[in-house]
Amino acid sequence: ITIGSMYHLIPRLFGRTEMYSVGMIAVHFWLATIGTVLYIASMWVNGILQGLMWRAINPDGTLMYTFIESVEASGPGYIVRLIGGLCWVTGMLIMAANVFMTVKRSEAVSQQPIPQSA
């Protein structure tokens, strides 16, 4: 909701009618959405994996896996988390470029009527 409201307000604050590129908004949306899903899902899967490894015990009551083994098993999840974070950051950089181009573009400023008191 916050990002959407920024996309609505930024052009109006600078006298424009719309953002520089609607296509960049769509790319940002999908990168941020996919990045967030990958990030959250990988953390959830790693949490379940580590929890199950930490509670597994041998018949004599000792732990079946060491802490280091549980961290090593989480490696693929960390890679997915990195990819998700990079997708999200890339989307935010695209948003920053879109905002910059909206503010700096050389088109004529829209002439909106200014309300006058009677």
Image (cartoon, rainbow, N blue to C red):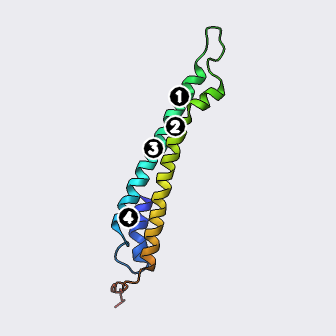
Q: What number is the disc on residue 77? A: 2
| Label 1 vs label 2, nearer the camera | 2
Local SS, label 1: helix
What type is the residue that disc 1 sits on? Leu
Q: CA distance from mark 4 to mark 1?
A: 37 Å
Q: Mark 2 or mark 3: which comes first in sequence?
A: 3
Estimate the x, y position of residue 55 in percent, counting from the top left.
Answer: 59, 21
- State which tag comes first along the sequence, 1 or 2: 1
Please tell me which residue is depicted at 62% across the width and 17% down the height of the picture: 64
The residue at the point 34 percent across, 67 percent down is 22
User: What is the spatial separation of the Cα atoms under label 1 and label 3, in whole angstroms?
Assistant: 16 Å
Residue at image location 41% in from the left, 54% down from the top: 31
The answer to whether residue 89 is above or below residue 7 is above
CA separation, marks 3 and 4?
21 Å
Q: Is residue 69 left or right of residue 90?
A: right
Q: What crowding class fits label 3: few (fewer than 14 Cα within 10 Å), some (14-19), or many (20 or more)?
A: many
Judge whether 52 appears above or below 26 on screen.
above
| Tag 3 residue | 38
- Check contact, mark 3 vs mark 4: CB within 8 A: no
Residue type, mark 3 in image:
Leu
Q: Which residue is mark 1?
A: 49
Disc 1, disc 2: CB below 8 Å?
Answer: yes
Please state which amino acid type lies under the numbered disc 4. Met
- Mark positioned earlier in the residue sequence (3 or 4): 4
Identify the amino acid type marked 2: Gly
Element class at badge 3? helix
